[in-house]
Image (spheres, grey):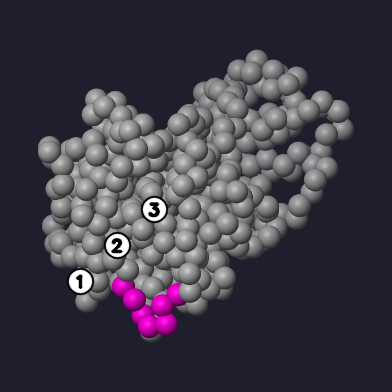
Amino acid sequence: MSERQSVIITFKPKDQRPDRQIDKLEIVKRTLAKGTRARFLDAKTLAKDTGAESIEDQVIGYDVNRYEAPIVSAKLTQSEIQALRQDANVAKIEDDAPCHAAGFGPYRYLKFESTACPTAEKIPDGVKQVYANQAWTTSTGKGINVAVLDTGIDFNHPDLKANYVSGFNFVAPGTPPMDDQGHGTHCAGIIAAARNGWGVVGVAPEASLYAVKVLDMEANGLFSWSIAGIDWCIQNGIHIINMSLGCDAAPTALELICNEAWKKGLMIVTGAGNQDENPVPPQLSNVDYPARYTNVIAVSSITSSDVIAPNSARGPEIDLCGPGVDIESTLPGGNCGKGSGTSVACPHVVGVAALIWAAHLGSIKNYEVWNVLAHTARDLGRTRRDSSYGYGCVNAQLAVASTSFPAPDMPKRP
């Protein structure tokens, strides 16, 4: 049997296809070798926390059933790929690129230090640095659904189980999205560890958490899993997506689904990525994808002294910054611990966004939340939009107090 490789197929919009009466899955299936059985998942049919049973002898793909982002991911042979390349209904076929948690890949020094959780409730320094605790009299994030696209979440953790709702595992469909690495649980705790008299407290301690597992136990994944995860979030009422992951290259299909999520009213916040301690010149950029995209909020990492962290990525795509050095949060097994990098800066911004959204629930849109974040940030750079700090460090106290929103036609990046 010919070896199969994972690819991402982007179709032309249906009204631009020669075979506009034929569903795109049927177009893929007609190229498969005779006798090949194929099963495709999609967000509308996937149940929360569980999915299709593992079927190793089938070609399993994923169908993004959206007009503006008609995408199918599948494992195909070279002859099947070639047949699709020649199909006039297909816009592009791309290799399914790998990605990893921000702080992993070549940056193995950014590891977690696991310890026992505090026996008395503790507000971590990072939460204080964004003034979240001073905003809780106005908003705690209640009513806002936040998805952590990562290694999963330890939903049994005492600081997380009260706010955990559900999720889906795209790494191993059919199994719960339990964290087998630690990265996702750490991010989740920064966002929404509960106020329960024990352990640590998150930026938005009453926000609802969803685990969308798109990274494995080595903190690695495929961008097709992230695309599927974003599609799942669109279908399942998520407000904000935390993506502390990326890579220095990505398929264009990823930008399509990010744009579709923004258009549908979601907000995607990502870590900008990490570097060695020799920063790039100001005119250059080493920001990862998807943080480079216009409709994604890119977050750099700062120290407790409000200075750009030596290992933070920089570039003109940076939107905001957050605390990212020795940040204390939850870890699997009921533990806590410290981590560093843009991975942990990102969920601080997500938490503040949740506080804003909850304070104006029902009367504010994603672009308005973004503009509040930008206009109330503490300006730390040399210019209003600095390549290290973006618009500055998020300020929850000022943000939730904002009572006026910029004009609806204001773009994500003014």
What residue is shown with label 2?
A: 126
Which element type, helix, strand or loop, lies under badge 3?
Answer: loop
Mark 1 vs mark 2: which is more N-terminal?
2
Question: In the drawing, does residue 254 fall left or right of residue 361?
Answer: right
What residue is shown with label 3?
A: 340
Contact, mark 1 vs mark 2 (Cβ under 8 Å): no
Which element type, helix, strand or loop, lies under badge 2?
Answer: helix
Q: Residue at x 68, y 52 (%)?
A: 172
* Placement of the N terminus among the 4 image quadrants: top right
Q: Quadrant of residue 239?
A: bottom left
What residue is shown with label 1?
A: 134
* Residue 359 position (above or below residue 92): below
Q: What amino acid is found at the position of numbered circle 3 in the picture?
A: Ser
Which residue is farthest top?
86
- The residues bearing labels 2 and 3 have C-alpha atoms spaced at a distance of 11 Å
Q: Report if residue 392 is visible in the image.
A: yes
Question: In the drawing, does residue 80 fall left or right of residue 362?
Answer: right
Q: What amino acid is found at the position of numbered circle 2 in the picture?
A: Gly
Q: Position of residue 317 (x, y in %)?
A: 29, 35
Mark 2 vs mark 3: which is more N-terminal?
2
Query: What span is in magenta?
Result: 117-123
Crowd tier of the residue under label 1, counting other residues whose Cα lies within 10 Å: few below 14, some 14–19, many 20 or above: some
Point out the frontmost of discs 1 and 2. Answer: 2
